[in-house]
Image (spheres, coloured by chain):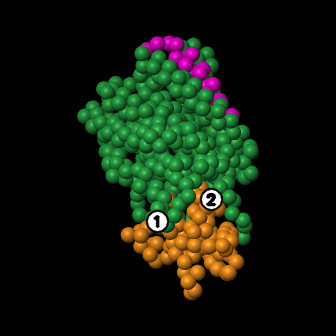
Amino acid sequence: MSAAPAALNLAKSPPLDLPMRHFAAAAVAFWVFAAAFALGTDRLLGFGFQAKWSLGLVHILTLGWITMTIFGAICQLSAVLWETPLAWPDAARWAWWAFILGLSGFVGELWLGGNRYWIAAVLLVGSVAVYLACFARTMILAPRLDWTARHLAVSIACLAAVIALGLMLAWDRERGVLFHDPQGALIAHIHLALVGWVSLTIVGVSYRLVSMFALAHVDSKTPGRLALALALAGLAGLALDGLFFGRRLLPLWACLLASAYASYAWQMRHIFSARNRRIDPALAYTLLALAGGAVWAALGVGLAFGLLRDDTSVLAAYIYAALVGWATPFILGQVHKITPFLVWLHLFASRPWTAKSPPPKMTELASEKLAWAEFSAMIPAIALGLAGLLRESQPLLRAGSLFLLATATLYAAGTGLTLSFLVREGAWTQTSAPR
Amino acid sequence: MDADKRAALMALNSVIDPEVGLDVVTMGLLYGLDVTPASVDVRLTLTSQGCPLGPTIIKMAREALEGIAGDRAVNIELDWTPPWSPAMLSQEGRRQLMP
């Protein structure tokens, strides 16, 4: 038995604007990506991975949408998961501006065909370095790091490697002196990002959040531990092989990574089997992400073993499965839970309540119908997009891109409604200290 | 059950976990309730030790009990033994969560 930790977590939460400004910017980036994708489907079939347009498209999604959302979530999760306030929140707020400016300049210059994307890239890298310093300092100060935090510690280290390698690739793009196998270095960069940064973050967070949202208690963590070990072995092998050893053992690394995914999926199966709640949009999105991740893993094994043709359309399908099929539905699902939680925490948690005037439930703070509509558009967006890329079919790809644009539009509309509600309530910069 | 204890239970019935949508009694979070002339003593648990809404639920329970306690002191203690599990959900709670 222990005494109640009076308002421990509330006092350590950052001001509401810190996570919310990240979610808002991420929603805009997701919409810009979806709109550019829909407008430029004719450029995607048969594109070159070094083409500036596709480089811009990938980075608006990976940095603007996925990374920005993860950064915003970590700003908040540090307080509730590790009982430690985010270190240097003002630095994180400035880093947000630098990140936005850097990413806008970087992608804008790529899309306009310019060669000065370097300048913006340096600003972008500087902002990420500030974020990484904030997160690392927070973890050092935390009294204990849970299973989720250990995943995040690894994924943050991977992000540092992604950024360093990306900067070297950008510098070397027209010089060709740093890497004897630029394609291998690009493969290392892509997988450090997709597996090391994005996927390990998702996997670590899912053990905590999905089991909490599903009201499922699972005792065995063995499949999850195995998944982490296999993923680290596969990722390290793939990155080193791509950078230094001429990509000789790609099938082995692909098998390790696919096994890691299978082990993770097995752990998630336990969670869903033990769930005590109906499937809501957040859990439905998680199931969709698990399906997308399975397609991604299968495509990776197929490419590594030469079972699929190694051309840009299949490679694009591989990247699409990872970013749009796996990462995006998972993020959408969690944010549909995190945003109402934040609003409730900052607006309602500190108010005195009576039985006659109870506080609202979190489900009353967001439209479930809007979330289901968004989810319904996401399924064909993934399926048709993948089919369009694999079959090199322009009509299928265009249809998939339009569904994705519908998803992004609905999501941006939902985010906009939440933001306008917060501004009306005067809660934008409010801390969660008692009123 | 005496009237004071029933009133305390009714008060706790009004404390809703805002994420799950169920009250703490239906959730099976109430481990003990004792009403004496001097105090209202409650042992509560949370769905997990890192439950982000834990402190808020405790605050809401305290406010609800203070509404019926009169001059009595309200003591709320967190009890982690046994750890909460979904098996502790009441039948009604189960029905509402998995219709």
- According to the image, label 2 marks what residue? B55
Give the residue at x 53% y 60%: A353
Chain identifier, orange in the render:
B
Give the residue at x 65% y 55%: A7
In the image, is residue A328 part of the stretch drawn in magenta?
no
In the rendered structure, which segment of residues is drawn in magenta? A113-133
Image height of A315 relative to A294, above or below: above
Looking at the picture, tell me which residue is in the foreground, A315 or A31. A31
- Chain of the residue under the numbered disc 2 shown in the image: B
Q: Secondary structure at mark 1?
A: loop
Image height of A149 relative to B51, above or below: above
Q: Quadrant of the N terminus of chain A?
A: bottom right
Q: Secondary structure at mark 2?
A: helix
Give the residue at x 52% y 36%: A21
Horizontal relation, residue A367 to residue A104: left or right: left
Looking at the picture, tell me which residue is in the foreground, B69 or A273. B69
Chain identifier, green in the render:
A
- Chain of the residue under the numbered disc 1 shown in the image: A
x, y (%) of residue A412? 39, 38
Give the residue at x 61% y 63%: B58
Q: Is residue A426 visible?
A: yes
Residue type, mark 2 in image: Pro
Horizontal relation, residue A120 to residue A387: left or right: right
Q: Which mark is residue A356?
A: 1
Same subunit, tags 2 and 1: no
Q: Residue furthest front?
A: B71
x, y (%) of residue A8? 67, 54
Image marks 2 and 1: residues in contact by CB distance under 8 Å: no
Image height of A59 relative to B43, above or below: above
